[in-house]
Amino acid sequence: MERTAGTASVEPGVVGAGRLSRVVRGLSLLFSGVFAGFLVCVLVLENSLRGFGASVYTQVRLVELDSLDRLASVTLIPAIVTTVVLAIWARGNDRRVVLIAVALLVVVFATTLAINLPINSDQSAWSVLNPPADWAAVRDRWQLAHLIRTAAALLAFGTLIGSAVTRRALPGPENSSRVLKVEARR
C-alpha cells in the first residue's frame, strides 16, 4: 500500500481508487452540507416562532413533524456513513480532521436521539386547540438542543470543507510517477 501524508491509502496502479475516494468525499460534503443547511432553515423558522403563542407554535410544529424527520434521516445517516468511510480511507492529518467531523456528526446524532426525537414524539400528539400548559418550556428545551446540533453540523461541514481544500492530490495513474520520484529521493 502506498501512503502519503493527508491522502487516502491507494494501491499503486489501482485504476479508479482515487476517483472512488473523491466520490466518497463529494458525497460526504453533499450530505453533510444539505443536512447542515436544513438545520439552519429549521433554526430560523423556530426562532421566528418565538413571537407567537401556543396554538400557532403547535400548528407549525405539527406541519414540521409531517415530513422533516424523514428529510433529516435521509441526509444525516448518509452524511455519517460517508464521513466514516472517508475517515477510514484518510491518512495523516486528513484523517484527524475527518475524525473531528465524524465526532461532531455523532454529537448531532446523539442530541437528536436523546432530546429532539422524544420531544418530537410527544409534540406529535399535541392539539392545536389545547396545547399543554408547559408548551413554552418544551419548546425552549427542543430549540436549545436544536441549536447545539445545528452548530455541531455546521462545524462538521466546515471541517470537511477544510479537509477537502487542504488535502494533497491522491496518488494515481496520472501522478504516480511523481510520487515514485519523491519516494525514491527519501
Image: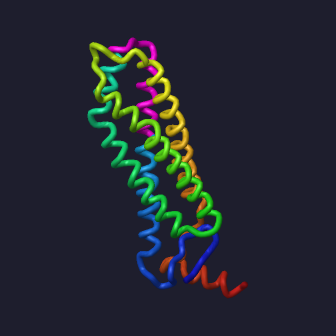
Queried whether the magenta region covers residue 51, the answer comes back as: yes
Query: Where is the N terminus found, in terms of image quarters?
Result: bottom right
| Residue at left offset 71%, top offset 85% | 185
**Is residue 33 in the magenta section?**
no
In the rendered structure, the answer to whether residue 13 lies left or right of residue 130 reads right
Residue at (32%, 37%) from the top-left corner?
Answer: 68
Q: Residue at x 27, y 13 (%)?
A: 129
Residue 159 pos. (x, y %): 57, 51
**Residue 26 x, y percent position in the rendering:** 44, 58
Nearer-the-camera pick, 2 or 177: 2
How far across and how far down the image is residue 110, in percent?
Answer: 49, 46
Q: Where is residue 132 drawn, in percent x and y?
A: 36, 18
Q: How is the image coloured?
A: rainbow
Give the dominant element type of the magenta stretch: helix, strand or loop. helix
Residue at the image point whose x is 37% and y is 48% from the top: 75
Magenta-drawn segment = 37-55
View extreme (right): residue: 186
Q: Quadrant of the C terminus?
A: bottom right
Q: Splitting the image into 4 quarters, where does residue 37 fall? A: top left
